[in-house]
Amino acid sequence: MRTLQLADKTVPVIGQGTWHMGEDRHQRQAEVKALRHGIELGLTLIDTAEMYGEGGAEEVVGEAIAGKRDQVVLVSKVYPHNASRKGIPAACERSLQRMNTDFIDLYLLHWPGSYPLDETVEAFERLREAGKIGRWGVSNFDVSDLLELNDPRCATNQVLYNPEERGIEYDLLPWMETEGMPLMAYCPIGQAGNLLMNPAILEVAQRHNATPAQISLAWVLRQDGIIAIPKAVNLHHLESNAQAADIELTRDDELLLDTSWPVPTRKQRLQMV
């Protein structure tokens, strides 16, 4: 598995997302089993948030990493309405308790909110100094938001990115590359399934004897400095995700995919889900 540096840690370029986990108690053991299997496959970066299942996903993560905490790089996110001087330490403590750990490797502001960024950063830094978190970062920030933040201590920006949502290539992705800031791509294989049924991606998948999901992941990872965090509960899908990092798309493959989803030629509003 290819790796890169994120928040002072060496992490795989493919991690595990947990959005929608912890919402159905009947699925809990399957979700725990999936995360643990993913760790065994080398997908040791786990991304979650207090928003997911209103803490339910963090509880699933806590169960999955029991006895394996030292193998995992743990990322969680705080609601913007909790991102105040007093709100952040309280929210972080709740997340730590749900995950049954005393340390979050990377703690993100889930999206820009109403509290001044200086106040949020101050709270993040106090958590770091107290040993509660390793580094902090942001999610769903556009270039203007990052310029307002203007802080080299920000470890990452997590945004929506896949072949059908590539607006960030116009300005955000180049800006982050220039700054040396890794990008975490959520929903790297889309959501509703339309992406994976596209004729171009199906043809590229056939060329590589791969699945459309693997091609989407390989496309997201075709550039350096990007981490994909697909969510999977099916064990076969997990194994397929892990193998996607080894797929190298050709220039012809990329040009074919460009016919369905062209390179952006103007500024687009940052998309988020």
Image: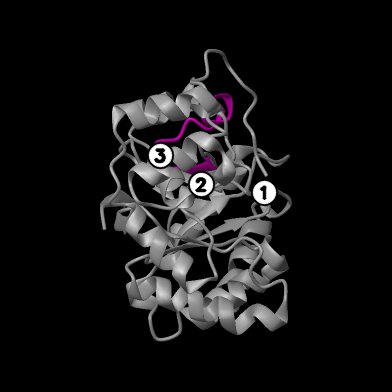
Comparing labels 1 and 3, the label whose residue is closer to the camera: 3
**Label for residue 204?**
3
- Report whether 126 appears left or right of 97: left
Crowding at dot 2, Cα within 10 Å, few <14 / some 14-19 / many 20+, comes out as: many
Q: Which residue is mark 2?
A: 188
Instruction: Residue 24: give its label.
Output: none
Q: Residue at x 53, y 79 (%)?
A: 32
**Regarding mark 3 in the picture, which secondary structure is present there?**
helix
Tell us which disc is closer to us: 2 or 1. Answer: 1
Amino acid marked by disc 1: Ala
Residue 179 picture location, percent across and down:
36, 29
The residue beneath circle 1 is 192
Q: Considering depth in this image, is 183 or 251 the residue closer to the camera?
A: 251
Tell me the CA gap for discs 2 and 3: 16 Å
- Image: 226 above or below 242: above
Left or right of 27: which side holds 108? left
Identify residue type, mark 2. Pro
Q: Amino acid at mark 3?
A: Val
> Range of the magenta residues?
143-159
Residue beneath the point at 68% across and 58% down: 87
Q: Closer to the camera, 104 or 164?
A: 164
Quadrant, the N terminus: bottom left
Instruction: Return the x and y of residue 85 as percentages of the image width and height.
Output: 64, 52
Q: Can residue 29 be seen in the rendering of this structure?
A: yes
Percent position (x, y) of residue 156? 44, 44
